[in-house]
Image (cartoon, rainbow, N blue to C red):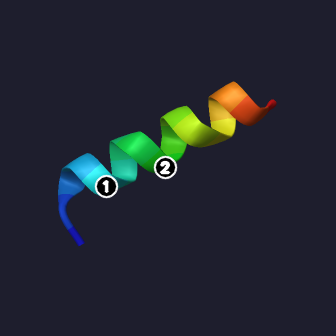
Amino acid sequence: MLFSDFIISKFHLAFHN
């Protein structure tokens, strides 16, 4: 898993909230 994937995952959660 790349670090970018982790960042994107965080963004997805933030956007979903």
Look at the image and tell me in which quarter the C terminus lies. top right
State the image coordinates of residue 13 (x, y, percent, origin top left).
66, 41
Which residue sits at x=23%, y=47%? 4
In the image, farthest residue toward the left: 2
Which residue sits at x=36%, y=53%? 6
* Residue type (three-letter) at the residue carrying disc 1: Asp
Horizontally, residue 17 falls left or right of residue 13, namely right
State the image coordinates of residue 5 (x, y, percent, origin top left).
31, 55
Residue assigned mark 2: 9
Residue 5 bears which disc, if any? 1
The alpha-carbon separation of the residues under discs 1 and 2 comes to 6 Å
Quarter of the image where one finds residue 3? bottom left
Residue 17 bears which disc, if any? none
User: Disc 1 on helix, strand or loop?
Assistant: helix
Which residue sits at x=40%, y=42%? 8
Horizontally, residue 2 falls left or right of residue 5, namely left
Task: Report the number of discs.
Answer: 2
